[in-house]
Amino acid sequence: MATLDHLVLATHDLEQGAAWLADHLGVALSPGGTHAAMATHNRLLKLGPSTYLELIAIDPLAPAPPRPRWFALDTPRMQARIAERPRLIHWVARSTDIVSESVRSLEPLGEITPMRRGDFEWLITVPADGHLPADGLLPTLIEWRAPRHPANTLPEASCTLLKLEGFHPDPVRIQTTLAALGLDQALAMHAGADIELLAHLETPVGLREID
């Protein structure tokens, strides 16, 4: 059964984005690392025993990958969206059997691809063109290949994810696929004119929203 693993926020510049988030949430993010296959780098924030927030950006020092980067980071639309501040663009669900759960999904989530960052290794679904499934509302699936989980290595930050909400003109479409994956309780779906993700967090400076 899949469960929520982490939130994905994208930013144009990792240092600037981390500074904005630290001010907004009242706590600094921890160093992450680089993803050589995608030419991206990240910072992390613990949200619970097995949940965290990932802030990700294109790594300007890395050679461009031979394929589109994940999370639609290469697209002009995404770059325009994250130009001013970090944005919550996606979420990732942890799987114990990524092959069967990918088959169970009513909509394609991407090709199962091996990845690594430092000592961490995982399998992850990545569309060949790098797009976000359902514009970010349907999750990427991840299956960790090591006994450790990133959240286990992060310092306590007094931040907790209280609720994750999604908005879509056809919320039933999203809910149906989430139910097939056993994830219908992970994301509360609502009807909305625009497609959007919204996270509610308890932080050291009180309740905060990120979108």
Image: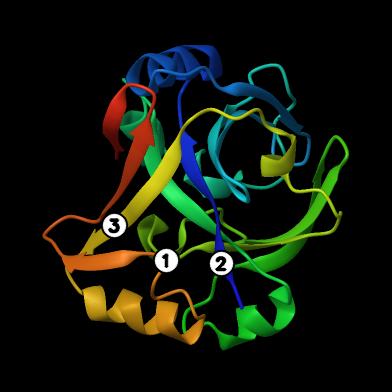
Q: CA distance from mark 1 to mark 3?
A: 9 Å
Give the mark, 2 or 3, whose residue is nearer the N terminus.
2
Residue 39's tag is none
Percent across and percent down for residue 132 are 46, 56
Q: Helix, strand or loop at disc 1? A: loop
17 left or right of 115 in image: left
Q: Residue furthest left?
A: 193
Q: Label 3 near label 1: C-beta < 8 Å?
A: no
Q: Amino acid at mark 2?
A: Thr
Dividing the image into 4 quarters, which one contains the N terminus? bottom right
Q: CA distance from mark 2 to mark 3?
A: 15 Å
Q: Helix, strand or loop at disc 3? A: strand
Residue 3's tag is 2
- Seen at 49% across and 63% down, the residue is 139
Give the mark, 1 or 3, whose residue is nearer the N terminus.
3
Residue on which disc 1 sits? 186
Give the mark, 2 or 1, whose residue is nearer the N terminus.
2
Q: Label 1 near label 2: C-beta < 8 Å?
A: yes
Dividing the image into 4 quarters, which one contains the C terminus? top left
Q: Label 3 near label 2: C-beta < 8 Å?
A: no
User: By what rule are the colours in the image chosen?
Assistant: rainbow
- Seen at 62% across and 60% down, the residue is 128
Q: Amino acid at mark 1?
A: Ala
Percent across and percent down for residue 205 are 32, 21
Q: Amino acid at mark 3?
A: Glu
Residue on which disc 3 sits? 165
Percent across and percent down for residue 81 are 32, 33
